[in-house]
Amino acid sequence: MKKKFKIQLKDTLASEQADQFRKFITSPTIIQLSIGVIVGGSLTDLIKSVIGLASNLFYFISLLLFSPRHTANLRLVLDPFRTVFENILTLCAIAACVFFFVKLINKFLVKNASEAFGYNAQLEETKKLLKAQQRNNDLLEQSLKLQRELLKNKASGDSPLH
């Protein structure tokens, strides 16, 4: 007779693992590393194509100046221009995809605002301080207004305190 073993995972363990994974995926360092690798690869291609364009442009000019018949193939310049343009479009498209992917992560996977990529704790604290300062300023204005009214009433003899 064979015995069947069942391994039961507690719900808390599974949800704890899922929460840890969510925090790992949404951590700013992982997102920054991903952005650096993805955009860096596209930027490398763009730089290589610009260098290729400069090299072919130099070769084209040297053929025009130093060849006996001053003949050069225009494709030496046009093909690298096309490659540079393609790489610029690729870089922009990849950057847009990364941007929207980070927005998606921030919207659906991040539970606390402090975990979101791009969260600036100092900025949020400054906003809270500015609101508190505005409330204090409003209260001071009200206090000054009441004090002026009391002084005016006291000077005219119509003080409500008498």
Image (spheres, grey):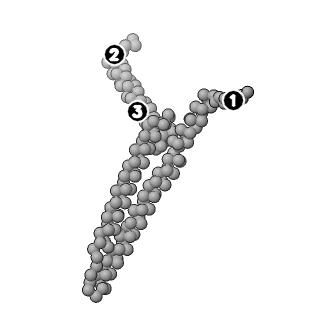
* Type of amino acid at the residue the image marks with label 2: Gly
Numbered label attached to residue 29: none
Judged from this view, the residue extending furthest toward the front is 1
Q: Residue at the spot x=38%, y=25% of the render?
A: 142
Residue 100 lies left or right of residue 14; in this view the side is left
Numbered label attached to residue 134: 3
In 3D space, how far apart are the residues under numbered discs 2 and 1 (Cα atoms)? Answer: 94 Å
Q: Is residue 116 visible?
A: yes
Q: Residue at the spot x=40%, y=25% of the render?
A: 143
Q: Which is more toward the observer, 153 or 90?
A: 90
In 3D space, how far apart are the residues under numbered discs 3 and 2 (Cα atoms)? Answer: 34 Å
Numbered label attached to residue 5: 1
Give the SS element for disc 2.
Answer: loop
Q: Are the two marked residues, 2 and 1, in contact with CB atoms closer than 8 angstroms?
A: no
Give the SS element for disc 1.
Answer: loop
In 3D space, how far apart are the residues under numbered discs 3 and 1 (Cα atoms)? Answer: 65 Å
Please give the residue where the numbered disc 2 appears in the rendered image. Answer: 157
Which-is-in-front pick, marks 3 and 2?
3
